[in-house]
Amino acid sequence: MLFEDGMFMRILDWDAVAKTKFLDDILENKNLLVSFGGNRSLVDSWNDLAKIGKKVDGVPQGHALRADTDFLERYSKLDPTKKVKLRDYLDKQKAFSGRKGQVNYVESKYIDGVGDVTIRYDQYGFPDFTDYCPRPTNKYILYADDLKGTSADFRRANQKLAKEYGFEKPYPKGSDNKYLELESGDFRWTPGNQNFYKKVNGEWIKHTWHHHQDGKTIFPLDSRIHNTSEPGSSGFPHSGGDALIKEDLKEIFESPIFN
């Protein structure tokens, strides 16, 4: 039962906004009430995620993940420090305009030089960029348990990709001791640069490496789709996996599936 072992008193201690939100959630999704059962940790986790997200008149509207009992179960098992870090990450999670704190939605936009692009934001509010990873994906994806969440990962991924195209270290340098540009087939990269170029339909397109939220996968996609802050880019806003890696929050979210 939901209100066993003092849980009713625990909920009574919440403020009026949290109580109202909780009632709205269980009325909208009766399975949520069943899943909570007498599990205090799930209810407390729900309350944690109800206190973040977009604010209306100064009141947080909560993150939609509070209705995902599988996620609440994972969250409830984290140590207190990691809970605070993950909650802060989700509170600041970047989203498409007007979508802060939402999950499972689709957005489309026109990007110069690319055309109409549609991206699905998944059950955790992250954009699914997997369709835009070059194929064959095994050539481009880097899986590693020891990613750093820094530019060192880009260097490592670029070196792996360069090897796929036949380039081995040490890379050639010019008379000025600077690395020379490497080019083979549809691949072009200057060692030391974070991005590489891939020829698509006869045009060299810059590609950016994306840290997936699982914390151990990195893959490239067209920079114009990925980036939002770079001049000339108008991509899809998102919070990447790099911040999760730095906060030791790996493997909370599932790894990507490439069709």
Image: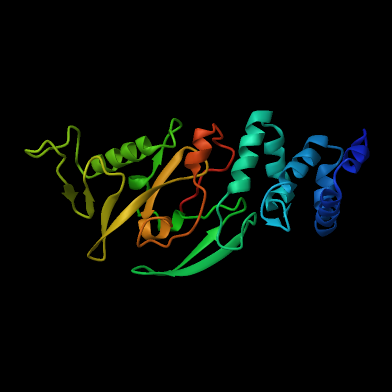
Q: Can you name the residue that lies furthest to the front here?
A: 58
Q: Which x, y percent locates residue 87?
A: 65, 41
Horizontal relation, residue 38 to residue 95: left or right? right
**How many tags in the picture?**
0
Quarter of the view holding residue 74:
top right
Query: Looking at this view, is 5 or 58 the one in front?
Result: 58
Q: Is residue 69 above or below residue 26?
A: above
Q: Which x, y percent locates residue 19?
A: 86, 49
Horizontal relation, residue 118 to residue 188: left or right? right
Query: Looking at this view, is 92 or 168 the one in front?
Result: 92
Its colouring scheme is rainbow
Q: Which x, y percent locates residue 240?
A: 49, 46
Horizontal relation, residue 189 to residue 225: left or right? left
Residue 1 visible in the shown view:
no
Residue found at x 82% / y 43%: 36
Horizontal relation, residue 145 to residue 181: left or right? right
Q: Is residue 176 above or below residue 181?
A: above
Residue 221 visible in the shown view:
yes
Q: Is residue 206 above or below residue 218?
A: below
